[in-house]
Image: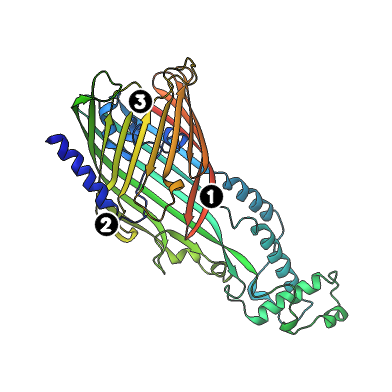
């Protein structure tokens, strides 16, 4: 009866969550989950898996030590491209002050400077509008007891996304006269820069003849999406032996299940004039107008409480098959102005199909397949599907390969003695910044220590 009630409760959770939306829960990843494409519902038997993917995994941990330093950092490849282009722009001698444009004198050096500056800016940023400099830093401190199935964790995660938005000249607040003045400066530049009354007289002052600089030309503003999450978590796991053996097993199967309680505080710098809780989106006009842009923004903090539940069925067959299900934020309080996180339902399968192969590279490899957030109708099947494989070549080196959303991820783990480890992963992600999606390639590193 007890086993039946557990399974019924999980099915009710799955059914209830089918009405959920697409707001992602707060989640930490490690290099193992990233390297395996985040296929972690049935095989996440480590600290990240326990507290952020499936609390039932705590019943299978083989460690009971306190872990204080378990930090990681991830940066997107776009940072390099953005820094390189902007560094070249800073090295140029640019001179532009909108208040000094001279709409009456087509030969004005000020108009020429304005055109040359704006042209340099436009050329630089044309290749940066599709870039998204994203990254995060996180640390997870925790203690688990492998005998009682109890674990506690404290974590901090700080994330940022930086990119550039577009504003047209008219959206920047430039008047027709100012636009024409810049165009006159452009005409002078394109007339070999001869500042004579004769050349000036040949340049049309009629805005209808504007051919260099137009009101529809675009210029960059700054997007800054940011957050700092601080949280405490407590996990409790349980395990029961089932009555019968699964096919191919020489002993009865077992069912692990668990629950996690968490309290999370999020802090972000936002635009207080429009209550945009994703972060800050400053338009070009904010800078050109010489305003104190920082006076428009403020830091806000909100706290919520949530509960996760999960179960893992161990068939104990020849392939060491495990079937997992978890519901993240099954119950959650409102996250204040950030909104209420929607429940996320994940289903996973993990097994070892290569045990019979006499190949040390594959013999102990573990394969995992997940369908995550499967009730979310806004995601395609390729976004929900996660596939990962992990193998060990030596006692010191572990390799990983993953697939998700048509992208390949890779990772390695190098053990540095008994207490320390260094993990690395390369993976792709889809980031959404103020309603626009960006595909990024990311490099992540993690250092762990157990005391």
Q: Write the residue at 47% across / 50% down.
A: 160
Is residue 202 toward the left or the right of residue 13 in the image? right
In three-dimensional space, the C-alpha distance between marks 1 and 2, rounded to whole angstroms, equals 30 Å
Q: Nearer the viewer, mark 3 or mark 1?
A: 1
Where 298 sits versus 16, above or below?
below
Q: Which label lies toward us, 2 or 3?
A: 2
- Report the side of 365 relative to 86 (left or right): left
Q: CA distance from mark 2 to mark 3?
A: 35 Å
Residue 334's place in the image compared with 215, above or below, is: above
Picture layout, residue 350 above or below residue 228:
above
Instruction: Look at mark 1 in the image and give the residue it sits on.
Output: 439
- Residue at the right extreme, as displayed: 198
Tell me if mark 3 has few (under 14), some (14-19) or many (20+) residues whose alpha carbon lies within 10 angstroms of its own.
Answer: some
Q: Residue at x 57, y 67 (%)?
A: 284
Q: Which secondary structure, mark 3?
A: strand
- Residue sticking out furthest to the left: 1
Q: Is residue 302 left or right of 393 when viewed as pictured?
A: left
Choose mark 1 or mark 2, whichever is in front: 1
Q: Position of residue 390 (x, y in %)?
A: 45, 27
**Residue 99's image quarter?**
bottom right
Q: Is residue 413 visible?
A: yes
Q: Which residue is mark 3?
A: 450
The earlier-in-sequence mark between 2 and 3 is 2
Which residue is nearer to you in this view: 121 or 34? Answer: 34
The mark nearer the N terminus, 3 or 1, is: 1
> What residue did someone put label 2 on?
334
């Amino acid at each position: 009866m007890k086993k039946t009630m557990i399974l019924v409760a999980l099915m009710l959770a799955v059914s209830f969550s089918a009405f959920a939306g697409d707001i992602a829960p707060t989640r930490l990843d490690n290099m193992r989950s990233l390297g395996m494409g985040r296929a972690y519902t049935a095989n996440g038997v480590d600290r990240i898996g326990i507290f952020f993917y499936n609390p039932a995994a705590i019943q299978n941990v083989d460690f009971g030590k306190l872990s204080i330093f378990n930090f990681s950092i991830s940066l997107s490849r776009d940072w390099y491209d953005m820094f390189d282009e902007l560094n070249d722009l800073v090295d140029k001698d640019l001179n532009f002050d909108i208040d000094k444009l001279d709409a009456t004198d087509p030969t004005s050096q000020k108009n020429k400077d304005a055109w040359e500056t704006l042209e340099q800016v436009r050329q630089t940023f044309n290749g940066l509008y599709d870039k998204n400099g994203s990254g995060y830093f996180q640390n997870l401190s925790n203690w688990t007891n492998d005998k009682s199935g109890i674990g506690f964790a404290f974590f901090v995660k700080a994330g940022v996304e930086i990119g550039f938005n577009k504003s047209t000249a008219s959206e920047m607040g430039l008047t027709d006269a100012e636009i024409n003045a810049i165009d006159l400066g452009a005409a002078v530049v394109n007339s070999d820069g001869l500042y004579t009354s004769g050349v000036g007289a040949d340049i049309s002052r009629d805005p209808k003849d504007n051919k260099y600089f137009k009101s529809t030309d675009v210029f960059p503003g700054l997007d800054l999406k940011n957050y700092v999450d601080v949280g405490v978590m407590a996990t409790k796991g349980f395990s029961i032996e089932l009555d019968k053996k699964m096919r191919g097993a020489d002993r009865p199967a077992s069912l692990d299940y668990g629950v996690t309680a968490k309290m999370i505080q999020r802090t972000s710098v936002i635009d207080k004039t429009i209550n945009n809780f994703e972060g800050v989106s400053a338009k070009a006009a904010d800078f050109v107008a010489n305003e104190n842009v920082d006076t428009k923004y403020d830091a806000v903090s909100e706290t919520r409480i949530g509960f996760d539940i999960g179960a893992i069925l161990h068939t104990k067959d020849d392939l060491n098959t495990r079937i997992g299900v978890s519901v993240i934020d099954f119950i959650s309080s409102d996250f204040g102005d950030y909104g209420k996180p929607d429940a996320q339902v994940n289903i996973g399968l993990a097994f070892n199909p290569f045990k019979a192969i006499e190949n040390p590279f594959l013999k102990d490899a573990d394969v995992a397949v997940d369908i995550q957030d499967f009730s979310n109708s806004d995601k395609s099947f390729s976004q929900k599907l996660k596939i990962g494989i992990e193998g060990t070549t030596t006692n010191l080196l572990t390799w990983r390969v993953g697939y998700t959303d048509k992208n390949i991820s890779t990772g390695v783990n190098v053990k540095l003695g008994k207490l320390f480890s260094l993990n690395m992963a390369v993976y792709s992600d889809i980031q959404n910044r103020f309603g626009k999606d960006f595909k990024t390639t990311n490099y992540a590193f993690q250092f762990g220590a157990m005391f």
